Structures are given as C-alpha cells and as structure tokens.
Amino acid sequence: MTANVTDIYRYPVKGLSGESLPLVEIYPSQTIAGDRMFALGRPGFQFDTQNPIWMPKTNFLALVRDARLAELATRYDDSTSVLTVSRASELLLSADLSQASERSALEAFFEKFLSNEISGPPTLLKADGHSFSDLDDKVLSLINLASVQAVAAKTGKDVDPIRFRGNIYFDGAPAWSEHEWVGREMTIGNSRLEVIKRTRRCGATNVNPDSALRDMNIPATLQKTWGHSDLGIYVRVTHGGEICAGDSIHIEN
C-alpha cells in the first residue's frame, strides 16, 4: 500500500501553534529538528534543565488545560532565536529567547494572557537534546487524513486535522489502517522508520484551533464509535533522510 505526505509540521514551543515546513531532514532516533524544543512550565513546576527527564504534559502550559493558547499564532526563527506571538494578524510580542530579559518578557506575557488560569508566571524551559514530547521517546507523529475524515463524517462537523498536532499528515490510506502498521517498518522518501505505537488522544483535541473553544469531545467520540481513543501513530526514525510534501509512504509487510 502507498500513501502520500500532504503536510509537515513542527511545534517549537509545546502547547503553542505549529509551523508548516516544505521539507525536513530527519535523523535516526531524533524528532524533527526544533520540535517541542521549548516548553512553558506551569507556575511552581521545577525542572532540571541540566539533567532533563520526561514529565507529563500536565506540568506545562498545554491545550489540554489552557484552551486560550489556540488564539495565538507563534513562529520561531532558528537563525535569530526570535519567537513571535500574534493574534488575528496583530503582533503581540517578539522575544529573542537567547536573552534572559526577553525570556522574562515572554513569561510575563503568558502570565497576563492566562491570568484567569494560572497564578504566576510560567517558566520557559529548554534543555539541550531534550524534546518536551507527550511521549517519553524521540519520535514523529503521523496523522491519516482519512481517519480524521471518518471522525468528521460521524460527528457531522468539519474537523481540522491540526487539532491532532501531528508532524506528518498523509492521505491515500484507508481510515484507521495506520493502526495495523504497529510493529512494521515504512519508508518515506529515502528515509526509513518503524511504527512503535498508536496515538491515544486527550482533551487537547477538543479545542477548535480557529476559535479556541472546546466544541467537540473527540476522545469520547472515538471510544463510543470505534471502541478506542486512538488517532494517529508514533514512528521512530531508523535511517535518516529528507522528507517533502508529496513523498510516497510505503508500508512493508
């Protein structure tokens, strides 16, 4: 079976908006470069950036608790370390994350922006070689657009695939067929990956990325209709290479 990559995304700051990429170079046992490189620790949360260990998403600002984050569009420039934060095309903040004073300004911005949800400033976190992923592993997440359409058909609503915050979106495969790929290998372009597990969905997917409202209950819909709360798969890179939109995905027997 052959499917095709439609879109590639990374999420430089955990919980904030994604960035569309035309292509990406991937490496064995690594995430997409810059994916979940930063996180905003909730007030009072302690994290040792010199000895980073995986921690659950509840310790960070994230859509699962902080739906208002979806109002913001963010962009990170690797060459300048500048993160911009906008809302409805209005620039709200531009901060050089390599500078302590500007990191503090970013933390103060989110304390004010989420003043009804948090009591105190969050802490911007970064640890060399660490990814603040929802999974305690360095992986990529893949989303089958046919599975998203199956949810849309069941609910009678438009379901933006961005709700699922995947790295690679693809079409051309039957809905839910990706769940049968666990334990198998795939190629995308000239790279090779192994499918390690299905992606269990949480309440973050209930947040509409356009309105920032919780207007669906996707985990409940999945469980009631298909008997599971999974949509998408996690894959680990075994042989690196370049991935572009339009690349074919081949699943090995």
Image (spheres, rainbow, N blue to C red):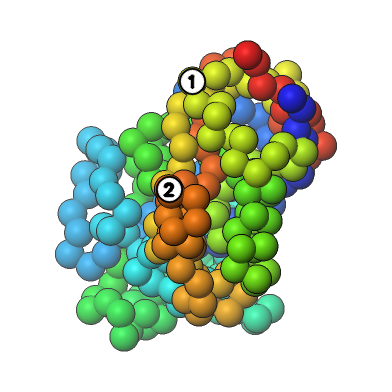
Which mark lies nearer to you, 1 or 2? 2
- The image shows residue 245, relative to residue 239, as above or below, that is below
Measured as percent of width and height from the top left, residue 55 is found at 26, 46
Q: Callout 1: helix, strand or loop?
A: loop
Numbered circle sitting on residue 231: none
**Which residue: 74% across, 42% down?**
171
Measured as percent of width and height from the top left, residue 14 is found at 44, 55
Relative to 184, 249 lies left or right: right
Mark 1 Cα-neighbour bin, 10 Å: few <14, some 14–19, many ≥20: few
Q: Quadrant of the C terminus?
A: top right
> Based on the displayed image, in which of its 4 quarters is residue 163 positioned?
bottom right
Amino acid type for the residue under numbered disc 1? Gly
Numbered circle sitting on residue 228: 2
Is residue 146 visible from the viewing direction of this image? yes
- The image shows residue 57, relative to residue 174, as above or below, that is below
Relative to 202, 246 lies left or right: right
Q: Callout 2: helix, strand or loop?
A: loop
Mark 2 Cα-neighbour bin, 10 Å: few <14, some 14–19, many ≥20: some
Q: Quadrant of the N terminus?
A: top right
**Which residue: 49% across, 50% down?**
226
Measured as percent of width and height from the top left, residue 72 is found at 55, 73
The residue that disc 1 covers is 183
Residue at far right of view? 246
Residue in the foreground of this view, choosing between 216 and 7: 216
Residue in the foreground of this view, choosing between 251 and 190: 251
Amino acid type for the residue under numbered disc 2? His
- The image shows residue 20, relative to residue 190, as above or below, that is below
Relative to 88, 58 lies left or right: left
Whole-number angstrom distance, CA of label 1 to CA of label 2: 19 Å
**Which residue: 68% across, 49% down?**
145
* Count of picture labels: 2
